[in-house]
Image: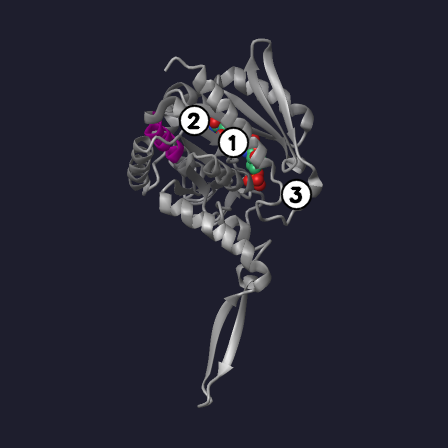
């Protein structure tokens, strides 16, 4: 990268997972997050619940140490946040590892862009006999039933202690957190599930190559040479997850690439399911690709787009995540049933 401020000599273009963790620093609050996950997992083991780790939202790649500019990965967090609710309904405890400020279970129904919080409220002003004015707020009557439904589900989940939330911003935060959380969850073995819906950066700038201060403009074009982010799915399957049920996603904009790429991922990493989706119809159609005796098998799940308007917010509107989660729970059951554990 051409940037002011000088950069220490540092050679690397391909990082393995090991060299990544040996050279890139952990996020400052990692240990605190690990302790909280350890306690959460221990409680779920005592209470004999399965746990799913859901990753959700996009990771960023900062271009400076004092970060002003960064590259972002597309994902609103809808897939992850919606799926979390259906996993909770199915009796799983959920570790929800998401990009800071992306959508979260339950509060997603009141996203500021589709259903702003202030639109739920009404102000009532009164004057007393002494002339003093007072105001109070109520929920708009037409919105009350939906709010009661979402709020009671949210309160029940929190009272039971079955939803644990963690946040990441950068790809560095994400990888460190994913490795540490997977280690903690590995105590659950095959009863754990990993549902990797986050959109993870493919390229990054190692800390040693980053400019300390804001990159200055005025010297023509900026050339940045980025390194490849290690594909951690291999380590996840063979080392970190200790036999858990691993589901990865494959997002493409060219639908012809989905199945070949999903098959290649299964061959390379040896996990249980790849869910393929195409950018423009991902809310209505996905494909489950799995290894089978004949090589691979593909199962398409589809819902009618008309039953899922873009502004849909509550569970009485059909969401494809309901079918994705039902299918995964069934496959996880079968897989556990077929194990010798
Ligand atoms: O949040 P929404 O707006 O609803 O969008 C949801 C989604 C489209 C982002 C989601 O459904 C989805 O497809 N997520 C995966 C996006 C993707 O294709 O990621 P990828 O190609 O970078 O990675 C493929 C898989 O490999 C992922 O499951 C990832 O966990 C894994 N991976 C990625 C990078 C990396 N360094 N190591 C990995 O193991």
Front residue (pair 214, 129): 129
Residue at numbered disc 1 = 202
Residue linked to disc 3: 308
Q: Nearer the viewer, residue 72 or 163?
A: 163
Q: Nearer the viewer, mark 1 or mark 3?
A: 3
Element class at badge 2: loop
In this picture, is 98 found above or below 264?
A: below
Give the quadrant of the C terminus: top left
Residue 37 pos. (x, y %)? 33, 37
Q: Which residues are magenta?
A: 176-186
Q: Residue at x 35, y 40 (%)?
A: 27
Residue closest to the eye, 85 or 111: 85
Q: Is residue 74 visible?
A: no
Where's residue 302, x and y in %? 66, 31
Check mark 3 vs ligand 1: CB closer than 8 Å? yes or no: no
Which residue is nearer to you in this view: 180 or 135? 135
Image-based side of 219 in relation to 258, left or right? left
Q: Secondary structure at mark 3?
A: loop
> In the displayed image of the protein, which residue is found farthest to the bottom?
130
User: Residue 164, image x and y in percent?
Assistant: 38, 41
**Residue 172, labelled with which disc?**
none
The reply to whether residue 332 is visible in this rendering is yes
Give the colour scheme of this rendering: one colour
Place residue 43 in its image quadrant.
top left
Which mark sits nearer the N-terminus, 2 or 1? 2
Q: CA distance from mark 2 to mark 1?
A: 15 Å
List the residue tagged with mark 2. Answer: 12
Q: Tell me which numbered mark, 1 or 3, is placed earlier along the sequence.
A: 1
Ligand 1 within 8 Å of the CB at mark 1: yes
């Amino acid at each position: 990268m051409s940037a002011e401020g000088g950069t220490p000599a540092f050679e690397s273009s391909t990082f393995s997972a090991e060299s990544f963790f040996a050279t890139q620093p952990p996020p400052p609050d990692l240990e605190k997050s690990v302790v909280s996950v350890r306690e959460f997992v221990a409680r779920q083991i005592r209470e004999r619940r399965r746990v799913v780790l859901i990753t959700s939202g996009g990771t960023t790649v900062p271009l400076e140490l004092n970060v002003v500019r960064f590259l972002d990965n597309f994902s609103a967090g809808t897939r992850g946040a919606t799926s979390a609710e259906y996993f909770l309904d199915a009796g799983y405890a959920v570790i929800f590892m998401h990009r800071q400020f992306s959508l979260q279970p339950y509060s997603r129904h009141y996203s500021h862009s589709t259903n702003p919080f202030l639109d739920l409220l009404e102000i009532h002003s009164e004057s007393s006999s002494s002339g003093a004015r007072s105001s109070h707020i109520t929920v708009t009557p037409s919105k009350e039933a939906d709010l009661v439904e979402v709020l009671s589900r949210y309160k029940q989940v929190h009272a039971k202690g079955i939803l644990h939330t963690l946040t990441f911003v950068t790809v560095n935060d994400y990888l460190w957190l994913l490795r540490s959380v997977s280690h903690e969850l590995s105590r659950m073995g095959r009863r754990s599930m990993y549902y990797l819906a986050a959109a993870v950066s493919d390229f990054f700038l190692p800390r040693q190559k980053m400019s300390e201060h804001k990159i200055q403009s005025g010297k023509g074009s900026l050339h940045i040479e980025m390194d490849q982010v290690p594909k951690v799915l291999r380590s996840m399957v063979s080392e970190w997850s200790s036999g858990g049920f691993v589901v990865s996603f494959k997002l493409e904009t060219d639908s012809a690439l989905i199945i070949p790429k999903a098959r290649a991922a299964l061959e390379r990493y040896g996990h249980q399911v790849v869910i393929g989706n195409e950018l423009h119809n991902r809310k209505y159609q996905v494909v489950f690709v799995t290894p089978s005796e004949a090589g691979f098998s593909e199962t398409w799940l589809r819902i009618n787009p008309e039953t899922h308007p873009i502004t849909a917010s509550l569970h009485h509107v059909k969401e494809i995540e309901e079918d994705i989660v039902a299918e995964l729970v069934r496959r996880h059951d079968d897989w556990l049933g077929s194990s010798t554990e």
